[in-house]
Image (cartoon, rainbow, N blue to C red):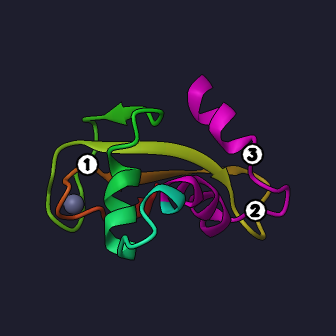
């Protein structure tokens, strides 16, 4: 969780999940300017800086492993736990 906290420290204070994702993705877009949004999402799922868990299953493809991170949610004071499916052909994201 320490790594995730450092990663999210770059997010503007008003950040939502979308802003946090865009910040993370932005560096990859520079290296792969022709990448489709879906490819970027795959990169997020395989990001080695994100912790992984096998305690959840993807609601979309039933994959037994997901990366997760916490991010502030617009309109909520508490941090929200988000999951990203580790199935490279899925990349489904959901919140706890
Ligand atoms: Zn999935």
Does dot 2 land on a helix, a strand or a loop?
A: loop
Residue 8 colored in magenta in the image: yes
Q: How far separated are the C-alphas under marks 3 and 1?
A: 23 Å
x then y, percent, for residue 70:
59, 45
Q: In which quarter of the image is residue 48?
A: top left
State which tag comes first along the sequence, 3 or 1.
Answer: 3
Q: Residue 10 carries which label?
A: 3
Q: Is residue 45 left or right of residue 25?
A: left
Q: Nearer the viewer, mark 2 or mark 3?
A: 3
Q: Residue 15 carries which label?
A: 2
Residues drawn in magenta: 1-28
Q: How far separated are the C-alphas under marks 2 and 3?
A: 10 Å
Q: Is residue 33 left or right of residue 65?
A: right
Q: Which residue lies furthest to the top in this view?
A: 2
Does dot 1 land on a helix, a strand or a loop?
A: loop
State which tag comes first along the sequence, 2 or 1.
Answer: 2
Residue placed most toward the observer, 78 or 91: 91
Q: In this view, does 73 lie above or below 11?
A: below
x then y, percent, for residue 85:
29, 54
């Amino acid at each position: 969780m320490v790594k995730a906290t450092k990663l999210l420290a770059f997010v503007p204070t008003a950040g939502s999940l979308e802003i946090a994702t865009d910040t993370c993705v932005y560096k990859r877009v520079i290296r792969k300017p022709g990448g489709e949004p879906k490819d970027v999402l795959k990169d997020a799922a395989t990001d080695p800086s994100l912790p992984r868990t096998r305690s959840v299953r993807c609601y979309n493809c039933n994959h037994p492993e997901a990366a997760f991170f916490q991010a502030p949610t617009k309109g909520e004071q508490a941090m929200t736990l988000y999951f990203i499916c580790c199935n490279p052909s899925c990349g489904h994201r959901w919140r706890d």
